[in-house]
Image: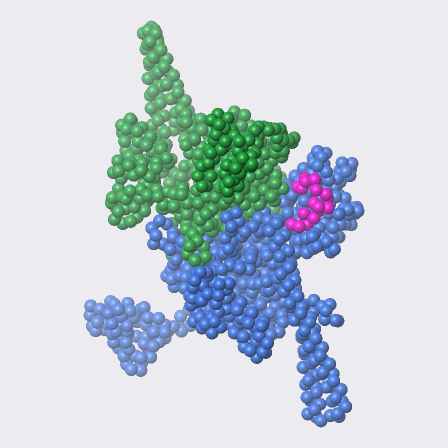
Chain colours: A green, B blue
Amino acid sequence: MAAEGMTPEELEAALQAKAQETEKQADTVRAMKAKKEEKAVVAAAVDKLKELKKELAELTKAQAASDTAGADNKQVFRANLNKVLEQNLFFIPSFKIYGGVGGLYDYGPTGAAVKSNLTEFWRSHFVLEENMLPIECPAVTPHCVLKASGHVDRFLDMMVHDMETKAFFRADHLLGDFLEKLIAAEKDAAKKHELELVLARLDEYKQEELGALIKQFDIKAPETGNALSEPYPFNLMFQTQIGPAGNSIGFMRPETAQGIFVNFKELLYYNGNKLPFAAAQIGQSYRNEIAPRAGLLRVREFTQFEIEHFVDPEDKSHKKFKRVADIAFNLYPREEQLQAKGTVKLSLGDALSKGIIANETLAYFIGRTYLFLEKAGIDPERMRFRQHLQHEMAHYACDCWDAEIECSYGWVECVGLADRSAFDLDAHSKASKVDLTAFKKFDKPIETEVLQLDPQMKEVGKVFKKEAGLVKDALLALSDEQKTTMQAQLEGAGEAELAMESGTVKITPDTVKIKTVKKKISGKTFTPGVIEPSFGIGRIIYCLYEHSFYTRPGSEQRTVFRFSPVAAPIKCTVFPLLQQQKFEESTAQVAEALTRAGLSRKVDETGASIGKRYARTDEIGVPFAITVDHTTLEDNTVTLRERDSMEQVRIPLLEVAEVVRCLCEQHISWKDDVMSKYPRQEAKEE
Amino acid sequence: MAAEGMTPEELEAALQAKAQETEKQADTVRAMKAKKEEKAVVAAAVDKLKELKKELAELTKAQAASDTAGADNKQVFRANLNKVLEQNLFFIPSFKIYGGVGGLYDYGPTGAAVKSNLTEFWRSHFVLEENMLPIECPAVTPHCVLKASGHVDRFLDMMVHDMETKAFFRADHLLGDFLEKLIAAEKDAAKKHELELVLARLDEYKQEELGALIKQFDIKAPETGNALSEPYPFNLMFQTQIGPAGNSIGFMRPETAQGIFVNFKELLYYNGNKLPFAAAQIGQSYRNEIAPRAGLLRVREFTQFEIEHFVDPEDKSHKKFKRVADIAFNLYPREEQLQAKGTVKLSLGDALSKGIIANETLAYFIGRTYLFLEKAGIDPERMRFRQHLQHEMAHYACDCWDAEIECSYGWVECVGLADRSAFDLDAHSKASKVDLTAFKKFDKPIETEVLQLDPQMKEVGKVFKKEAGLVKDALLALSDEQKTTMQAQLEGAGEAELAMESGTVKITPDTVKIKTVKKKISGKTFTPGVIEPSFGIGRIIYCLYEHSFYTRPGSEQRTVFRFSPVAAPIKCTVFPLLQQQKFEESTAQVAEALTRAGLSRKVDETGASIGKRYARTDEIGVPFAITVDHTTLEDNTVTLRERDSMEQVRIPLLEVAEVVRCLCEQHISWKDDVMSKYPRQEAKEE
């Protein structure tokens, strides 16, 4: 296949194959030379190697050209898309008449409708289908909760500022941008590689390292060229005061998850003290970004859909896993990333049996997430589940996968699926001093050996006198581990130390007996593990816009969104052919029938041509359009048109709303049901 | 009817009737005396009057007793209700394990489900049905927006603090509580009345008046008895910083409405530049209450459903008004309040034709709001629409009505319906310097007279030399009013003054010609009026809890919520009779069928008795319950039970989910369809 005809993915695959072939041939040549084989044979092998190297160089060149063209195309595509999105009020820069505020966007009527459609779909796909416990907590959160969760101390970005203008920048973004330019300009392969290694670790640099690198590369403030401050931490939470006293710090929550964790005990009780169960929350979260960019992808206020699935850490099986086990899609496991390979298409059952995904529950949610995104309208070929590398994960996490969606900004993290172990519950239990454990009864009681400690109170009284009571309390408060140590000391040295508030006292074998006894245990007490799927719906919606946007062949101005009826902001448009009363009555009748069928509709009564009105309806991705025309007045039928095929049928006015409802709920299909049942109408679109 | 058997409402009605009868009899007696009628006749009339006065006194006494008992009953009722609500996680005090935060509550699984049910119902009843434009704006709002809206300067409560402990109080609440106690203890009728007048004006007192009254009554801090500070204003908005620079003040929005107003121009364009149209927003609002009380009714973070209906101020008719014109319900017009009368039951058509409600659009939304509340499950007899008194309304408002719902806290404002005129758009237009007007084309152009001003440039040049251009600009910038004045001055005094930046110059008839000319005008430019229905869904939900809560006769412990299927948090419970595998399989089959039918369900597989499991399901208001029992294993039928009647039928397992779906969507009724079609089952509930 000629390089010029290839898609970027095909080019990448061809390049990798060629590189491997070349490497192998080089090995062959070296082996031949080592074995001192015949000159002619070696020469032929060398010729072949030369040929391969030439082909490799061509492919590399083609990829570079394609990347540049791709980048340009992406810029143009995104500019076109954003123009259509903003013109049709999918989004509006918030407070636009006051000049806007960085990182804040409104959902206009079309965008808000897409969002509430996907919200309802998510609720049905996860909360209803999985019988989750919905919950809604306030965004205003007191300091103590976010101190315990770690956000007060660790929810930071490193910031630098222009020493003259006081303009602020994220230190890692500045360094990254600088390195990318340097790499692009660098001709020396070794130096280029060195710079690439520095860039690859961008996410890991701490405050001092960032400062050193900014100094090393002598990075100046963009635009002004002024000197920069040292990097310093900025907490990304919006801070406020709760109440009038001025001493009660609160924050706008940076994630909805904490509201679920602090309610764990109540939810467990509500669930009949049984595990596993999941709670789900839909709500706003807030991140006071230093310098928001990347448009709708990095914003200061956004809606999260978060699920916390609480589970026995020793049993992460999932009852319904078999239902998703055979679904296969793009996974990008740790191993493939480290070896710089591409994604693999694997079934979840295989990924689990090969040990790639840590457990059944996590795999189940990965599968359900895939199905949600696919049904919402995300292109499965531009979606992958990428496993976090070891250093990306928090120290407590067992396994993390991000659902990443490809768009003009590259691969964007849209859903995080993390096995967070018992970290959050432990943290809140410690800080609140409230027990956040669960109890699981064994099928049969288990007999086990425990250490039993009996203070010998007669002797204790003699030795410790007035302190006897305190010594007794301290002895009874010892943990199993401390009892073991004390037993060993008493048996070895004949005495042991006991730490008390007033100091350390000496304990002898006379004052305490420690012995191993058998005990029946009816169950176990443990802190549940948490598996957390967390959805950034705004990012999913933006990627959906990119994946759904196209222009009619041969007519660059006619843009279309191929939204599925699930996502489409409006399900059906209704037009009277002409602005005359006789048409308007039937139009109103159809519009009312659509409303009664629970479908959002838009009536376009402007005098614009039918072609123009179809174009308008395509531009916001309305899947169906109904025209009331001259024929309607004769036989009470209307024209029904499907957006993507632009096919039209004639259909009785009294049936049309019900047919559109069935199409939207995907009980019937346009091709198989509508086109075969109703007479086709000659399409006339300008 | 004996007073002791009456409800408070009947007592009130009897009292009013008796008072009128007594008044009339007194008139009769006076008339008789004036006419000097026969002594015996007059004496009989006087006896009757005495009898009436005695009966009136008895009724008055009964009412006083009933009020006290009522207050006690209300306390007990509310305590019982709140216990059930909190135990079943309708709400949870937020951050409970950390001791909670005043005025912040979570919706637990049951409460969150009720809330999302009502949200969906509202969306369908208003946004879909009325074809409104949905919109979603961030809660983080920059200072400039809330300065323009008036919130920075006027969204204040007056606060006092304990001079020793620094505890904070709302000055009006403190004064109100103090006056209520004083009034209760006051025996002298005249003094009591005087105090009541002071209390009645509580909402109106400004900072200084509050301070003077607190001094006058020598009010001290509650509990400590310490001296109080002077009252001072506290802004109820949560303040924060946007971005890292520290110079960009933001607030968490106190209402969602402003996000719609600032987008008016975009929305008008989206609507094809046509009026009227409405935009709707569902979202969180924030009020940093000084000292939250009244439980779930006064909270610091809450969800608002707000509609802004933009309309030509000269045409507030509504196309669909006739659909609600005949609905009659409790209205409490201004006139009735001023005359201390009760509510009147009036149809909206009558209220409009009598001039009680200001316009058709406002009346339409009052009607739609009534229908929403009634369908949600609010008792129509404990709901009224109260018109604001003149002094309650903002100066710019034309007419305001509150939907008030009666609960144990009294009459609670749950929805505000206000005709806000053009105030908000004018304020934002002025502050942002962006035109926020609409243009309406007349059916036919109108010919009208306008003043045309022509600077005579030759003469202007001669007189003003280098300044001629500036003078010309200043002349052309004159408003119609200024032109009229100048014309009058030129004709009268023969000269006029023109204000310029550099000072005032003298204009003579030679330098400018002003004449009246005829001009065709094709339409008018105006700032639209706004009619705003604003729903506090949290308050509606709390009142719904009160109106739905009851106990089974003869069994005080068995509490029930009579939620309609629209509101019910869970639509159906499923029980296996016994914890055995043979029952569990059919149970799982029913549960799956319910999920497929889109119904939330709960499976109760505990070993508790059937009676106890029905009681649990009643306690959270689940309307239907299905039991899988021995008969199921024989003939594949299950028991279906309706919550309020406790009636049961046997119904085929394969049909039951569909029947429950039809019941929940209210396509069929329990009494008429289910009981008549399926065999009745002997009810056995402990």
Residue depicted at x 40% and y 48%: A288
Magenta stretch bounds: B603-620
Residue B506 shows up from this direction: yes
Q: Is residue A528 magenta?
A: no
Question: Is any part of residue A606 visible from this angle?
Answer: no
Viewer-proximal residue, B117 or B512?
Answer: B117
| Looking at the image, residue A516 lies above or below residue B1 | above
**Residue A444 x/y as whole percent:** 65, 30
User: Who's the residue at 40% across and 39% down the image?
Assistant: A409
* Left/right of residue B506 with respect to residue A273 in the rendered view: left
Image x and y of residue B552, in percent:
72, 54
Which residue is situated farthest in the front direction here?
A462
Front in this rendered view, residue A314 or A370 = A314
**In the visual, does B60 lie left or right of B392?**
right
Q: Is residue B233 above or below residue A102?
A: below
Q: Please state the horizontal and vertical placement of residue B12, each as a whole percent of the image.
A: 67, 71
Image quarter hosting the N terminus of chain A: top left
Residue at image position (70%, 42%) is: B608
